[in-house]
Image (cartoon, helix red, strand yellow):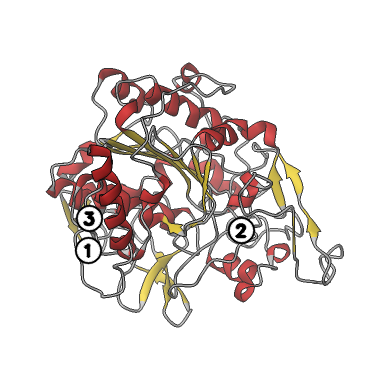
Amino acid sequence: MKHARFVALATLLAVAACNSSSGTVTPPTPSPAPIQNVIVLVQENRSFNNLFAGYPGAQTAMSGPCKPDPSVPKCQAGVPVQLHAVTLETTGTIGQGTDLAHGHAAWEIEYDNGKMDGFDLITFGTTGAGTPAKLYPYAFVERSEIKPYWDLAAKYTLADHIFSTETTDSFVAHQMLISGTVQLSSTESLTDTPSNFPWGCDASQGTTTTVLTTGGKILKNGPFPCFGYRTLADVLDAKNVSWKYYVDSKSADFSGLVWNGFDAIAAVRCAKFVKPETCTGTGADWSKVAMPNTTIYSDIKSGTLPQVSWVIPSLADSDHPASGAKSGPSWVTSIVNAVGKSKYWNHATIVILWDDWGGFYDNVAPQQLDYTSLGFRVPMLIVSPYSKHGFVSHTQYEIGSILKFIEQTFGTASLGATDQRANSIVDSFDFTQKPTAFSAIDAPYPQSFFLRNRVMPSATDVIEHDGGPPE
């Protein structure tokens, strides 16, 4: 009888997911899932096709169109470009080398009004001022290096139609993961990255953001990156749902300077914020920003894992191009295995998501819902004892889909942002099935590897080499 109720309520969820056009903020229907913990593992800068080209049942391509240009002699009209293999740990300097442009301007070029043929016209270097990348973006990662991801997809659920909500890079993507919006007004939204480190309320005086207008203009003198919009923390706190945001500190790794989404939220980071750029003390929720990110291992072991977790990688474990490291799949696997072997497994969902496409080729044109979205496809794995076994979901998702599922799971109010319009990921589960017993995923590096103190390039090194922050 209990499973029958799950099915009936799941049907209601499908109806509720469509309630996104009225403009009113309605509470999401509570999820029927016996899920008590949702863990969002974030990775960096890979298109869906870059990691899962050729995956059985997924919409992928091993070649793609290019736009003829005199600077790219190998690109010919009507002749598909064959994808080439690259290593996960492509070397170079973050912000240049094999790090591709992936801001809004690069998105516009690659998207080319839905033709998806401009990938040969972007540059290396995150600012878009580097050398021409030519055919390099037409690439897939060597499958031997990402075998743990394919193994997880074979056991659980792989989503092949989740799109990064915004048409830009990591600063905005990490905001969307907690807020579902970066709208500043009815005509302006954040895009690209702040002018200085850190990317948040800790930024130096004079730091500005970049703004995209409804008319398509890019404005470089946007507000200081310390914002007042609501986040999922607000709705979780209101319902007394426990949460943590696991991330490295700004002194340990530059990922703590740029990928800490809550550092840009005034109510969390600051006890008091006086515009334009004075942040004093820390908010009550700042204690829930757990540093370093390896704290999650001890929380799982001690039985103190919160109901909702975001886990942000260090640079070394992030899959970020030009990082010089290939430990990302092992890092993800180490957390999955820790949860799977713990008391949490039978009531857990682990969502593994890449924040943006990193400039790499993808073959599915994103639907344009408004002037800021949708961006290109990114990979997403849904690992749970209730996720559909070996299933490839073709439902259109975006980052707000994850937020919506969290709201449904814990019966909170809706943020009233992109979570309203997004399809929940609830259709990737089968709550009538018996919970799948966990079996460990093999990976080259064990959990002990990630508890060591590994030194990566500092933010200062990046700025000196690139003249600007990485995305």
The kind of residue tagged 3 is Thr
Within-10-Å neighbours for mark 3: few <14, some 14–19, many 20+: many
- Look at mark 1 in the image and give the residue it sits on: 275
Q: Marks 1 and 3: which is nearer the front? A: 3
Residue 178, given in percent of the width and then of the height, sits at 32, 51
Q: Residue at x 34, y 20 (%)?
A: 342
Q: Earlier in the sequence, mark 1 or mark 2?
A: 2
- Towards the viewer: 302 or 228: 302
Dot 1 or dot 3: first in sequence order is 3
Q: How far apart are the alpha carbons under marks 1 and 2? A: 32 Å
Q: Which residue is mark 2?
A: 101
Residue 85 position, x and y percent, is: 75, 43
Question: Compared with residue 356, is residue 325 higher up or lower down, i.e. above or below?
Answer: above
The residue where tag 3 is placed is 29
- What separation in Å lies between label 3 and label 2 (alpha carbons)? 40 Å
Q: Residues within 10 Å of mark 2 (few under 14, many from 20)?
A: many
Callout 1 touching callout 2 (CB < 8 Å): no
Name, please, the residue furthest toward the bottom.
215
Of helix, strand and loop, which one carries label 3? loop
Q: Earlier in the sequence, mark 3 or mark 2?
A: 3
Q: CA distance from mark 1 to mark 3?
A: 38 Å
Residue at left offset 44%, top offset 61% = 165
- Quarter holding the N terminus is top left
Q: In this rendering, would 323 be left or right of 433?
A: right
Question: Label 2 is placed on what type of residue?
Answer: Ala
Q: Residue at x 22, y 52 (%)?
A: 279
Amino acid tagged 1: Lys
* Quarter of the figure with residue 322: top right
